[in-house]
Image: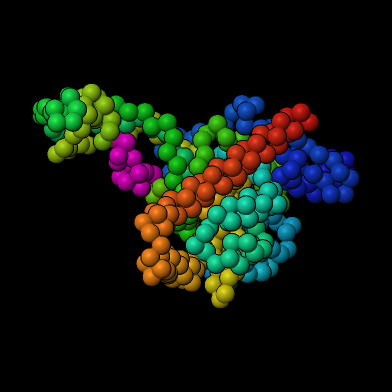
Amino acid sequence: MKCSSCGGTLRYDIASYGLVCDFCGTVKRLHRPEEGAAIGEFDFATALRGSNTNWGITRRLVTCKSCGAQMLYDSDQMSGMCPYCGSAVVLTAEDADCGVAPTAIIPFTLTKEQIAEKFYRWNKFAFWSPEKFRRGKILSDLVPLYIPYWTFEADAVTAYSGRFGRTTGSGDNERTTWYQKTGIAEKHISEFNVCGSRKFFNDKMLNSTVSFKSRECLPYTPETLSGMAAEIYTLGIDEAWNYAKTVGLKKEIMESTRENEHADCYTNLYYSTEFYNVKFKYVLVPVYLAGCKYGSKIYNVVASGTNGRGKCDRPISIAKFIITPLLFLAYFLIGSFLNLGFWYFQIGMLIPFLAIALYAIMFFVAFGKQREQEAREREQYYSEK
C-alpha cells in the first residue's frame, strides 16, 4: 500500500499497531479487535463453488527450494528468509493463484524483542537443560509468519441411541443408575478451528501455542498484511471441514447427547449427525518461528505473536541426570560411613522437597513480575491512545 503523503510504501509496524511510512513517518492507525469491526462469514456451500480470491494486493507464491514450504510475499519484495528452515529465499517474478482470500486476520501485537525477552526469562527454569542452553543467548532471528486457520460454525442435529447413567451418592455409597434411551440432540457449534497448514496440522508445539477466539480477529485488509509473509493454506476447506465433523467435533457431539439426557455418563452410544447452516472464516494467525542452535542440532521455537505463549524444544543434559542422583547417593553414603545419625538422613530426604519448593517460589515470582510488566504495558498503550 502506498503512502498518501509521499507515495512511499507503507509497512505494518507491530509497536504502533498501524502502517508506517519509512520515508516521511506517516502512521495510519488500524482498528483494534475491541472496536467491534464486522467480520464477514461465508456460507460453506458457496465456498466450495468458489469464494473471493482477491487479496487486495499483489502477492506471489514462493516455494523454498530447501524444505519445500510455500509462502506468500508482497510483489515488491525481492528476498527473504524461509521461516521454517532459515534458508535464504530469492523471489522471482512469477504470478500464482493464491486461492481463497482471508476473511479475518489477527495482527501482530508483540515485537521480536518482547518475545526474545520472554524466551530468555522462562528458559532459565529449564533445569534439566545444559547450562549454556539455559543461560546463553542461543535464540536465532525470530521470523514473523501468518499461519492459515479455518474457523467453522454450524448447527448439529444428532440422532442417537445408547445407555446413559445418573450417579448418586459418593464414596462407598456412590451408585450409577443406567437406562437405555433414544433421542435427538441439537448443538450449535460456535467456532471450531482447524489449522490450514499441512506442515503444522499435527504439530503439537504450534497447536498448543496458538489459541484464539473470533473476538480477537479483525476484518482482513491488505494493509494489515503489508510487509509480512503468510503461508498459503495447503489443507483445503473441504478437507478441513471433513476432519472437523468426523474427528475434531466427535467429543463435542457425543457430549451433546449426554447433556440432552441430563446424564452423568454414557456407554454403547450410536449416533448419526447432520450439519446445517455451515459457515466458515479463513483467519491468518500470527506466530514467530525460530531455532536454537546448540551443538550440532537446531531446537525449534514457536511463539504466538499476540499473547506471548510459546513452546521450545530443549536438549537434555545427560550430565545433570547422572550427577544429581550421584550427589544424593554420596550424601547418604557419607552419612552412613560417618554414622552422623538419623537427623542427617531426615535432612537428606527433605532436600528434594525444599528444592522443588524453592523452584516453585522462583517460578511464581517471575510469573508475577511478568504479569505486572504486561499490565504496565497495556496501561501505557491506552494512555497514549
Count of numbered tags:
0
Image quarter of residue 75: bottom right
Which residue appears at 46% of the width and 70% of the height? 323
Q: Is residue 313 above or below residue 37?
A: below
Q: Which quadrant is home to the N terminus? A: top right
Q: Tell me if 18 is positioned left or right of 168 in this view.
A: right
**Looking at the magenta stretch, what is its main secondary structure?**
helix
Q: Position of residue 298 (x, y in %)?
A: 55, 69
Q: Position of residue 251 (x, y in %)?
A: 30, 39
Which residue appears at 80% of the width and 49% of the height? 9
The stretch drawn in magenta includes residue 247: yes
Residues shaded magenta: 241-253
Q: Which quadrant is home to the C terminus? A: top right
Q: Tell me if 179 is positioned left or right of 254 in this view.
A: left
| Whether residue 206 can be seen here | no
Image quarter of residue 344: bottom left
Which residue appears at 61% of the width and 67% of the height? 132
Say which of 384 and 53 sits in front: 384
| Whether residue 278 can be seen here | yes
Q: Position of residue 171 (x, y in %)?
A: 18, 31
Say which of 213 and 80 sits in front: 213
The stretch drawn in magenta includes residue 52: no
Image quarter of residue 373: top right
Q: Tell me if 233 is positioned left or right of 345 in this view.
A: right
Say which of 126 and 161 sits in front: 126
Q: Position of residue 362 (x, y in %)?
A: 56, 47
Which residue appears at 36% of the width and 56% of the height? 342
